Amino acid sequence: MIRFLSVLFLAAAATWSNAADEPLKLSASAPDRYVVVRGDTLWDISAKFLNQPWRWPEIWRMNKAQIKNPHRIYPGDVLVLGRDASGAPLLRLESKVRPQIYAEQLSQAIPPIPPNVIEPFIAAPLVIEQNGLDSAAKIVATQEDRVFLGKGDTAYVTNADPGQKNWQVFRRGEPLRDPENPERILGYEAFHLGSAVQVRPGDPAIFEIVTAKQEIGNGDRLIPTVRPELVDYVPHKPESGFTGRVVSVYGGVGAGGKLSIISLNRGKNDGVEIGHVLALEKNRTVVQRDENDQKTSVVIPAIRYGLAFVFRTFEQISYALVLQSDGTVEVNDYLATP
């Protein structure tokens, strides 16, 4: 996971030249200097200096001679706000604390967005197609004295690849419906129940439960464990006008806030990319009565209240992390180009 988070800006040079469609605007409270502390993220630091924190590759790339890789910034480093020859803002690295051990460097480097929040959503397939688990390996029996399984218990599994040792256990959740067309099912939320190892191949094969976040039982499905894909988390807004809706707030709740995980009704098929930054908006319709006591509807202009960062995409749906929110994030809220 550490290496995964450190591969952040390989594509920054390619995207930066097309990223700026307007001058960088400094935050009214931008400090002259800032000392990086443990727990910071690149988004947090950039938000202290910029009105548009997703444009951090620009403010650092301007000073590429001093800060070649923003993901190599560590606690204790001092960032100084300055200007280049044209007057555009830049960040200058005044001092740099360099840990002596390389492994320690990787573990201390400042990540782009909070890794502990998104890690479970990277390592597991959280959205499945309508019939996506039908052909997956399946628990058909538990050890004799168990109705539900926990850590160390035995499961008997059919349709398991004999060459695959490590597996993740899932259960299909509620359908994710498109708010713009409730008859359209975008997919199903997959509930991650735990992990298991294949002890003895066969049909059924013998599995041992390694971890159990929830009760595991007959009918639950298993998917081979795969290593997370290395991703370049380079923030950028969609090239063309974007509109979408919030499908769900992860965890089965109807509302969320900062650091909530949301799903949106747009995916790879709609051009959504990892790293897209989207604005969260409220659209309200107020019903009132006129002078004749007749009901009339008044549409209130969209109110922008937050920002979300797309970190995983599927064919018809995507997951985003809410990084800024001045209000409550709710299902059916709108998403747009910031």
Image (cartoon, rainbow, N blue to C red):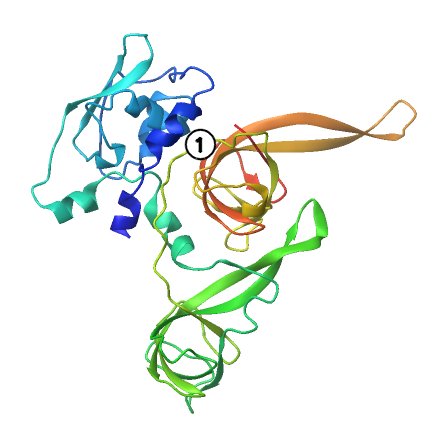
Say what amino acid the circle numbered 1 marks. Answer: His
Q: Position of residue 220 (x, y in %)?
A: 50, 75
Residue position for label 1: 236
Q: Residues within 10 Å of mark 1 (few under 14, many from 20)?
A: many
Question: For residue 41, which quarter of the picture?
Answer: top left
Q: How many marks?
A: 1
The quarter of the displayed image where residue 288 is located: top right
* Horizontal side, residue 91 vs residue 235: left or right: left
Q: Position of residue 188 (x, y in %)?
A: 58, 60
Name above or below for residue 221 compared with residue 79: below
Kind of element beneath mark 1:
loop
**What is the x, y in percent for residue 7?**
29, 43
Image quarter for residue 132?
bottom right
Residue 66 vs residue 320, the one in the foreground: 66
| Residue 321 image position (x, y, % from top left) | 45, 42
Left or right, residue 249 beside residue 100:
right
Residue depicted at 58% across the width and 50% down the height: 316
In the picture provided, is 78 more to the left or to the right than 297?
left
Task: In the displayed orientation, state which residue is furthest to the front.
Answer: 14
Which residue occupies the extreme left position in the image? 100
Q: Is residue 43 visible?
A: no
Q: Residue at x 46, y 16 (%)?
A: 22
In this view, which residue lies farthest toward the top? 86
- Residue sitting at 21 percent across and 36 percent down? 72
**Residue 65, above or below 184:** above
> Would residue 308 be visible to someone looking at this image?
yes
